[in-house]
Image (cartoon, rainbow, N blue to C red):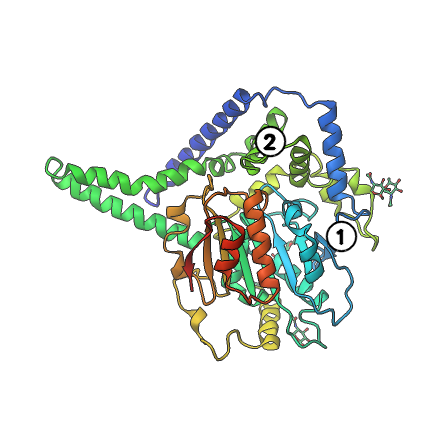
Amino acid sequence: MASLSTPLKSAFVFSYGLLTMAMYALIAISAGIFFKNTTEKETVELQLARNRLWNLSKKWSAFSHQIFTLQNGFKFHYVCNDPDTTPGAKKPLVIFIHGFPDSWAIWRHIINAESLQSTATVVAVDLPGYGGSESLDRYSATTVLENLTEFIIAMRSKYGIDSAADTHQQRTIIVGHDWGCVISMRLATDAPQLADRFILTNGPLIPLVKSNANRLLSSSLKMFKAFLRSPIRSRALLVNAAKTLMPILDQMKSSGYVFSFQLPRGFVEYLGTGGNRAFLKLCHKVSYGSQEFTPTDAAECMASTLGPSVHEGENRTTNGEGYAESVVRKRALSNFFEMCSYYRDGTAFSRWNKSVETITALHNITQEHGPRDAGSGAGIFNDGPKGSLKASATILWGKKDNALTVPLCLDGIADYLGQDSQVIELPGSGHFTPLERGSRIALSKAVEWAVKGEREDIGAVMEACYPKATVIVRK
Ligand SMILES: *[C@@H]1O[C@H](CO)[C@@H](O)[C@H](O)[C@H]1NC(C)=O
Ligand SMILES: *[C@@H]1O[C@H](CO)[C@@H](O)[C@H](O)[C@H]1NC(C)=O
Ligand SMILES: *[C@@H]1O[C@H](CO)[C@@H](O)[C@H](O)[C@H]1NC(C)=O
Ligand SMILES: *[C@@H]1O[C@H](CO)[C@@H](O)[C@H](O)[C@H]1NC(C)=O
Ligand SMILES: *[C@@H]1O[C@H](CO)[C@@H](O)[C@H](O)[C@H]1NC(C)=O
């Protein structure tokens, strides 16, 4: 790809994006979704679901809504089970970060568990541009990660992890899915102090994917060149060159939607809203895998995607805080373009230019909690290729993921992981591990294991709750 000239590349991205969009339209039409009008019942279900998930003055399960305003004025929305901020509350902190096209609510089946609510302070946040959190002008790595890091540091101090009078024994765990996983991986690489463990599920480690793609591409190219030198004698090389390229073509096929998201704004907005939001409806249906998908599930998925409506904009949290003006006014009908901007603005791979404040705050955490792994293996996190994770990570991978292929996303991942890390394959699950029944149990158990101090063997914990769960990497 690097050798293609820019206009050619743009033309390719445009045509492939458009083609994919047309394909989605055909799928939606043949599934009878595209021309189907919304029934009155569906409208009511959706409004009720939006009220359940986004009404600031109501509790959801044991959770209350919170708005946190950063120093620069940026407003994050999150839900938390423990607004009680008494210093000395000795619970671990778990921060959940969702992906595309979701919000805090994708964790609804996991954070609902009483066992988690009673043992940890749980924070489920909306990424900028999603759910009830404000939008950014641009979603570069710097704007997203700077603001998110300030939020996480604020949560650590608000819920007693970094408070002055503390013994600093409490653990912090960050859990990420899809884009939340991509972003958490960047944190684990460049701000590993933020958590004692990262639990990551079905999101690509971008530097690894790049390296795998480059390796396959260059070996395929070598074979092809060798073939050209004596086309008759080395026909087998041509076949091998094509075979080597297959994983990349597979991934390109699964990633068609990423190309659609690069189209001019009007197209992207149409993709998000056209045919009564047919694209999102398809996504939601797929996200439940083979399990039953009721009208209430459909409404909750859509409410999770769309965030608060103008009605929820009228109510306040118990602290008298409301959603940012832009959330309920500009985004109430569709936040689809915001969500796609993560793909457009290079959040995954652009440089994170850390501010002095962030560097100081991260340094503070290291100072207070001591250097990681003192005594056991100092420096162990300094090894590995560029983009390696520098914090302990547990990766749970739904192997039937249609969006992310194993040869590009998992091959060679061991090199990128540090001490006390594992990769566990969940053979029966797809991409949406927080929603599918089997994988959400596995995820809950992994979080519980981390909250309780990682006393058991994670492999055994997974095998006990998920049939044929396999630890494929252990460091
Ligand atoms: C954080 O978000 C605000 C938007 O409110 C943006 O202006 C700012 O640039 C972001 N912070 C950084 C350091 O990029
Ligand atoms: C939100 O919940 C409060 C308290 O239950 C209720 O009074 C209010 O009407 C709800 N808001 C909407 C938009 O329904
Ligand atoms: C929520 O907002 C509605 C509409 O403004 C108002 O009538 C109602 O009293 C509010 N309820 C609460 C609990 O704030
Ligand atoms: C990085 O941020 C600093 C200030 O925070 C700024 O002076 C510098 O130009 C930025 N560099 C890049 C490459 O954005
Ligand atoms: C770092 O810690 C010092 C002392 O504990 C505190 O005064 C300072 O505000 C902290 N700085 C940041 C950026 O958190």
Density class for disc 2 (Cα within 10 Å; few <14, some 14-19, many ≥20) is many
Q: Position of residue 403 (x, y in %)?
A: 47, 40
From this view, report whether residue 301 is shown above or below residue 410. above
Q: Looking at the picture, which amino acid does disc 1 mark?
A: Ala
- Residue 247 visible (yes or no): yes
Check residue 183 in the rendering and tell me which mark sits there, or answer none.
none
From this view, report whether residue 178 is shown above or below residue 271. below
Residue farthest to the bottom, as pictured: 375
Residue beneath the point at 76% across and 41% down: 52
- Residue 140 visible (yes or no): no
Q: For numbered disc 1, what is the local secondary structure?
A: loop
Q: Position of residue 48 (x, y in %)?
A: 76, 35
- Ligand 2: does it lie within 8 Å of the C-beta at label 1? no
Task: Please identify, in this view, whether the residue under mark 2 or under mark 1 is nearer the observer.
Answer: 1
**Of residues 230 and 34, the one drawn nearer to the viewer in this rendering:** 34
Density class for disc 1 (Cα within 10 Å; few <14, some 14-19, many ≥20) is some
Q: For numbered disc 2, what is the local secondary structure?
A: helix
Position of residue 54 in the picture relative to residue 351 (left or right): right
Residue placed under numbered mark 1 in the picture: 62
Residue placed under numbered mark 2 in the picture: 281
2 and 1 marks in contact (CB < 8 Å): no
